[in-house]
Image: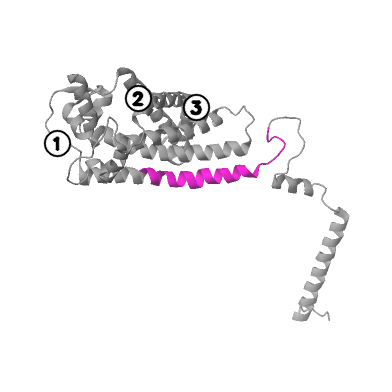
Amino acid sequence: MKKHFVLTRRRACWLCLCLLCVLTLSAVIMAQERGPNPRGDFWGSVREGVSGYTAVSSAGHDVLIHNGGQNWREIRNGLIAGISPWILAGVFTAIMLFFLIVGKDKLEEPRSGIRIARFSLAERILHWFTALFFIILALTGASNLFGRAVLIPVFGQAPFAAYMQWALWIHNVSGPLFLAGLLLEFIIWVKDNIPKKIDIIWFRNLGGMVGKGPRPHAEKVNGGEKAWFWVMILAGIVVGVTGVILDFPIWGQSRATMQISHAIHATVGLLFVAASFGHIYIGTIGAEGTFEGMWRGSVDASWAKQHQDLWYEHKIKEEQA
């Protein structure tokens, strides 16, 4: 009579132990036969970004994989693209709340009908030339930064790709033109935008837009306009210079230089656009009669007396003389 094999707990343990010994011995034998991986050091160096030999003389081409690119991508798509909408929305909301609570800064006296020249035709053309390219750069730059998250779900990948091909070209061409307009504005208007003591008093009184009391004195350009002028010039130069670096990668710029320039370009550009909301608000719906100065070139005498009283008195003396 045949005896049936019974798998007891002890036998199972011995079988597992034998199997483990066989697997371990096999791994050791295979490792000895295989030997060290001759390419292990190579790929380790690749991951660490170690430079090697290449026949290409361009900067950075002696490194197969640049780890800095991933760091830049995380900063660009994470920190900058993630915070930017909140900053823009926060500034816009604050301005709208100010408008709803405080209201438009209206003329305290009826319009006199007397027009006082404020900006020449050349100054107005220069202003709108620069403003046009600023708006184009802001829209195309925002499309580049937020397009994947905002525009692709709405229009689809193919239309977005076609749009971005033109948007990037327009952005790259508009940048130098904006920078040229900005430098001309600096040359023409810097003499009127030198900070003075009366500008500190203007800021203390918030330009007379909030609360009651006499309006602070101001010359042709008040403290708020001077602040915007210097923000525009400094931010514009930073954005313009970094933009030129990105536009023309033919001067031996390293990848690190390009990545840092892009981060600065996007960050300062974002803050520049956010600051422009205040300028646009005051120049359009925020203060009655202000838009006329840059559109028609002249302002009503009541506006001049209310907002730039020292400049108004100077103009009256000029006419009387």
Dot 1: few (<14), some (14–19), or many (≥20) neighbours within 10 Å? few
Q: Nearer the viewer, mark 1 or mark 3?
A: 1
Residue 162: percent from the left, percent from the top?
Answer: 48, 28
What's the amino acid at mark 3?
Asn
Disc number placed over residue 127 in the picture, else none: 2
Distance (Cα) linking label 3 and label 2:
20 Å
Q: Say which residue label 3 marks.
A: 172
| Membership of 71 in magenta stretch | yes
Residue 69: percent from the left, percent from the top?
Answer: 61, 42
Residue 174: percent from the left, percent from the top?
Answer: 45, 25
Locate residue 188: give its quadrant. Answer: top left
Q: Secondary structure at mark 2?
A: helix
Label located before the other in sequence (1 or 3): 1
Q: Secondary structure at mark 3?
A: helix
What's the amino acid at mark 2?
His
Label located before the other in sequence (3 or 2): 2
What's the amino acid at mark 1?
Glu
Q: Which residues are magenta?
A: 59-88
The residue at the far front in this view is 321
Residue 248: percent from the left, percent from the top?
Answer: 57, 27
Classify residue 38 as left or right of residue 47.
right
Classify residue 309 as left or right of residue 3.
left
Distance (Cα) linking label 1 and label 2:
28 Å
- Residue at the (36%, 26%) spot, across then down: 189
- Residue at the (22%, 41%) spot, across then down: 208
- Residue at the (47%, 32%) spot, across then down: 237
Q: Say which residue label 1 marks.
A: 108
Locate residue 58: give its quadrant. Answer: top right
Q: Nearer the viewer, residue 231 or 48?
A: 231
